[in-house]
């Protein structure tokens, strides 16, 4: 089945440790996104990528890093520099870049809930 | 900076009521506005609006865009308890694929 897979669903991290969240899609989408969701905050954009080997900072990129070495994968690393990493993280993808394909909806994974202990 | 403001932030109604959710935006070179419903984890797509004045409709849900006033509404008629969810509005603009969301409206429909 086509879709977006995030893993793990739940993740616990000790303070001071880096942790990497996985996001894989088999929809052949060019654009991918990472969002953070806190209660009452909606979705805040961390990073997005329009195409392989390219990514741009969103509104809250500090303390996070990403890579886009393959079209289907967009992992997010939460570094120890992120002051308050406990949150729900959502990955999304859309058909994306180029011509009329730009006006397409984004599809979401099931999310990863990260808790710092 | 792109900005999306949704109102109200929360709303409690009784089954059968009609609700209107609001979304205003500021974005450079607007391309599209999207509505999503989030019940548990993954938001699910409802509508994408690109042109003013053209209503999109799906069952009891409908949405319309006003590009002059930078505003969209999502209407839900004859609400049901299954409509309880967070409704998210997002915009895409400029020359990129950046997709910015608002804080969402939490709708609770009581029996």
Image (spheres, rainbow, N blue to C red):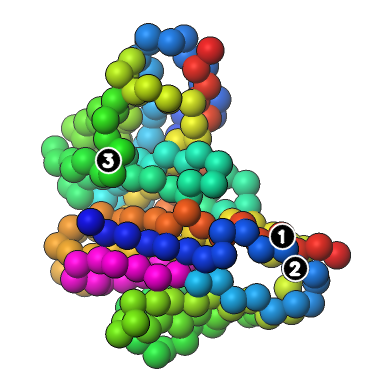
Q: Is mark 2 on a helix, strand or loop?
A: strand
Could you tell me residue B24's position as x and y percent?
40, 70
Give the residue displayed 49% in from the left and 26% down from the top. A86
Give the residue displayed 41% in from the left and 89% down from the top. B54
* A71 left or right, relative to B89: left
Pick the residue in front: B37 or B102.
Answer: B102
Q: Name the residue under label 1.
A: B108
Residue B86, relative to residue A82: is it above or below?
below
Point out which mark residue A47 bears: 3
Asked which quadrant contains residue B59, the reply is bottom right
Give the residue displayed 65% in from the left and 75% down from the top. B19
Residue under disc 1 on the same chain as residue under disc 3: no
Residues at marks 2 and 1, CA–CA distance in whole angstroms: 6 Å
Sequence-wise, which precedes: disc 2 or disc 1?
2
Q: Residues within 10 Å of mark 3 (few under 14, many from 20)?
A: many
Q: Assess whether mark 1 and mark 2 are in contact (beta carbons under 8 angstroms).
A: yes
Q: What segment is highlighted magenta in the picture?
A: B23-35
Q: Name the residue under label 2.
A: B13
Q: Assess whether mark 2 and mark 3 are in contact (beta carbons under 8 angstroms).
A: no
Whether residue B44 is visible, yes or no, is no
Could you tell me residue B50's position as x and y percent?
32, 78
Q: Is mark 3 on a helix, strand or loop?
A: strand
């Amino acid at each position: 089945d086509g879709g977006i897979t995030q893993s793990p669903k739940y993740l616990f991290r000790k303070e001071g440790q880096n942790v990497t969240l996985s996001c894989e899609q088999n929809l052949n989408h060019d654009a991918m996104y990472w969002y953070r969701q806190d209660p009452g905050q909606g979705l805040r954009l961390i990073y997005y990528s329009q195409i392989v080997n390219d990514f741009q900072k969103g509104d809250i990129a500090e303390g996070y890093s990403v890579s886009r070495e393959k079209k289907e994968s967009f992992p997010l690393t939460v570094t120890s520099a992120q002051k308050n990493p406990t949150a729900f993280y959502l990955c999304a993808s859309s058909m994306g870049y180029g011509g009329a394909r730009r006006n397409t909806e984004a599809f979401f994974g099931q999310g990863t809930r990260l808790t710092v202990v | 900076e792109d900005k999306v403001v949704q109102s109200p932030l929360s709303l409690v109604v009784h089954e059968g009521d009609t609700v209107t959710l609001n979304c205003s935006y500021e974005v450079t070179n607007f391309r599209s506005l999207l509505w999503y419903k989030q019940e548990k984890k993954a938001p699910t797509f409802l509508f994408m609006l690109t042109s003013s004045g053209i209503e999109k409709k799906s069952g009891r849900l409908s949405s319309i865009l006003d590009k002059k006033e930078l505003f969209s509404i999502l209407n839900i008629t004859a609400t049901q308890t299954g409509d309880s969810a967070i409704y998210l509005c997002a915009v895409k603009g400029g020359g990129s694929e950046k997709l910015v969301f608002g804080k969402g409206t939490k709708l609770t429909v009581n029996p």
